Amino acid sequence: FNFLSENWKPLKKRMSANLWEYFIQVSLGRFRTDEGLNMVTELVEERKGQFGLAEKTAEEAVETVQAQVAWADANSGPVETWLRETLDKPWAPHRFKFQDILVLARTRKFG
């Protein structure tokens, strides 16, 4: 992200349209925090109209980060609780046999 922000003009000038679009997607769409969302939103707003064929990709990156932040907000508590409960339990090895899988498969309804 920082590399993109600091080297905007030379990157855009040298990259093909497909590579530029992919670079925008990868650079902007990986954030999962409010801080990252703010950074991405700010860059997309500042550079609106300068993305070329990647304009829609940039807008979709903002939507992707918004969804990832919302997911993290909604699920971080339950995931943390599950991890704490699971990690507090003593570890026990489990051994499964092929016949265990067959029994499980027969009990499920298919179709």
Image (cartoon, rainbow, N blue to C red):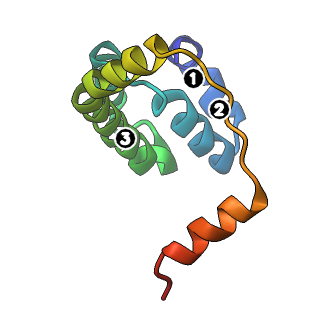
Position of residue 24 in the picture relative to residue 64 (left or right) = right
| Residue at (40, 39) in percent of width and height | 61
The correct choice, above or below, for 16 with respect to 35 in the image is: below
| Residue at (49, 46) in percent of width and height | 54
Local crowd size for mark 3, using a 10 Å CA cut-off: few (<14), some (14–19), many (≥20): some
For the residues bearing labels 1 and 2, Cβ distance under 8 angstroms: yes
Q: Which residue is mark 3?
A: 64
Please tell me which residue lies in front, 80 or 61.
Answer: 80
Q: Which residue is mark 1?
A: 9
Which residue type does callout 2 highlight?
Lys
Please tell me which residue lies in front, 89 or 58.
Answer: 89
Q: CA distance from mark 1 to mark 2?
A: 6 Å
Q: CA distance from mark 3 to mark 2?
A: 26 Å
The correct choice, above or below, for 2 with respect to 102 in the image is: above
State which tag comes first along the sequence, 3 or 1.
1
| Secondary element at image label 3 | helix
Q: Position of residue 53 (x, y in %)?
A: 50, 51
